[in-house]
Structure formats: structure tokens, C-alpha cells
Image (cartoon, grey):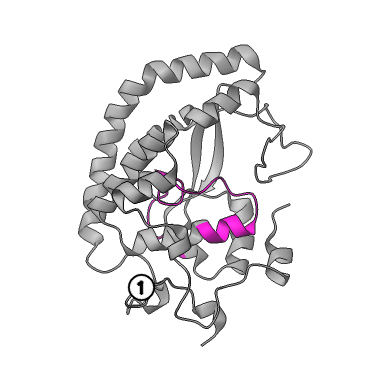
Amino acid sequence: MNRMQGFGWRATHCECPAHWGYGTPGVRPGHEGYVRFKTLADRLIASVLLLLALPFLVVAMALVRLTSRGPAIYSQVRVGLDGKRFRIYKVRSMYNDCERSTGPRWCTADDPRVTPVGDILRKTHLDELPQLWNVLRGEMSLIGPRPERPEFVSNLEKAFPYYRDRLRVLPGITGLAQVQLPPDTDLTGVERKLMCDLYYIGRLNPLLDLKIVICTGLGVIGVPFAAMRALFGMPSVDAMECTCGSERVSVMGAAQAQAQPA
């Protein structure tokens, strides 16, 4: 077996998307009904949450406008379901037009592009509230893989097998990867999140979604994922190691050279 085809997880049977027994990898057969229900529930819940969050959103936008130049809300093109591009909306947490000289690049620890107010918004996740509008528009789900920027996707597809299969469901505001892993800063982080995303797609069910929602709320108030894993039996990325091939997929060497975003 080609090592790039051996991407799976520890389990009693192989959970690799390539071995689910049907044409194009994606949502496991039998889960389609829940996906349709989830889309309707997302829009209903998002409409309620948006009304409840409106006062917090107004305060956040006012603080941004008072402390830095530029709009309070910014939009950015992301890649969504089946590769369709859409505009994601967020409360601006970085200095306006901060990529003018560098071009698109990942965030880093203590990123100098983040404003003091933006740092608070990111830590409390208040900057994510406008994405409820994306959910109402049917472009995102409350739970799913985070949507990536198109500038990065093509290179990441070259480095990782099945990377595009994370586009088989709507991207989400929160998800299995988001509750336990920090934002991507390198290819190793992308690999770990990809494992979580494909694991989630393969086991998509109401109980897992409920656990992710609870863990998201607990994470906002600072509860560590290790405690949430013990309480709710959440799957850890460390338990998703490849077993259907002789080696885990490596993201080092030549793959890193060709896929590292500018």
C-alpha cells in the first residue's frame, strides 16, 4: 500500500476515508439524514444566538472602532462545502490592512498584527459572533471543520492525502479540532487538525455534536480539554494515529517545502 493511502486511526476496523467502501470519500453512508436535520437546526439555533449575542456584538464593534482605524467588521474569502468559496465575517481583531506588505500568512504566537482589543476578542471568541450570519446564509454550520483560506488550500492538498475530504461537510464555527487544538501555525498543526476533521466526518452524530457544543462553552471559560475528555469521553487527536499503513503520513521534508504558505 502506498504510504499516502494509509491514513486512518486506531480502531477495531479501519476508519480511513478511502476504505469506507464507496466512491468518493465523504460523509459515511447512513448519516445523510442527520446532515439534513443538522442544517435546519443550525439555522434555527443561529437565529436565536444572533439575537442573544447582539448586545455583545455591538459593544465589541464599538471597542474596535474606538481603538484602531478601519471597519469593525471585516470579511475574508474562505473555502467551504465542496470547494465553494464564500465570505466569512468576523469582528476585526487585527490592524486594518495588516497583510499589505506580507501577503496572506498564518497567525503566530504573540502575533504583532493583533490589536490589544483584538487579543481580548480572540480569547473570548467574541470576534466569531458575525459568523452566525454565515450559518443563517447556509454557508457554514455551527459545528464542522474550520474553513481555510484559498491561498493555502491548494498547497495543503499537495502535502496531505484526503485534505479536500474535509470539504464534504459545511465548515463550522467550532468543531472537534477547535476544542482541543490551537490555531494552525505550521504543517504539523494542520496535520493534527486534519485527523480530527476526518474523524469527525466519519462519526458524525448528534451525541458527538452535543459534546462539542458543551466543550466549546467550557473551553471559553478556561476548562482544559484534558478535563473535558475525562468527563465526556471526547476523542483525543493522540488516539487517531494511522494504523492501516506501515507509517503515519509525514508532513516534513519535501512536502513542507512545497506547502508552507508564504
According to the picture, the residue beneath numbered tag 1 turns out to be 11
The picture places residue 78, in percent across and down from the top left corner, at 53, 46
Give the quadrant of residue 72: top right
Q: With 195 as the anchor, is 68 left or right in this view?
A: right
Q: Magenta span has 178?
A: yes
The picture places residue 42, in percent across and down from the top left corner, at 28, 41
- SS category of the residue bearing label 1: loop
Q: Nearer the viewer, residue 147 or 176?
A: 176
Give the quadrant of residue 141: top left
The picture places residue 104, in percent across and down from the top left corner, at 68, 45
| Residue that lies at the very extreme toward the right in this rendered image | 101
| Residue that lies at the very extreme toward the bottom in this rendered image | 1
Relative to residue 59, is residue 240 depicted above or below? below
Q: Magenta span has 177?
A: yes
Residue 137 seen in render:
no
Seen at 29% across and 30% down, the residue is 47
Residue 226 seen in render:
yes
Seen at 53% across and 59% down, the residue is 192
The picture places residue 10, in percent across and down from the top left corner, at 40, 72
Q: With 236 as the anchor, is 45 left or right in this view?
A: left
| Residues in magenta, as a range | 165-192
What residue type is disc 1 on?
A: Ala
Q: With 27 as the anchor, is 114 left or right in this view?
A: right
**Mark 1 Cα within 10 Å, few/some/many (few <14, many 20+)?**
few
Relative to residue 90, is residue 15 depicted above or below? below
Q: How many marks?
A: 1
Seen at 53% across and 83% down, the residue is 246
Q: Which of 102 and 144 is in front in this view?
A: 144
Relative to residue 195, is residue 46 depicted above or below? above
Seen at 58% across and 65% down, the residue is 157
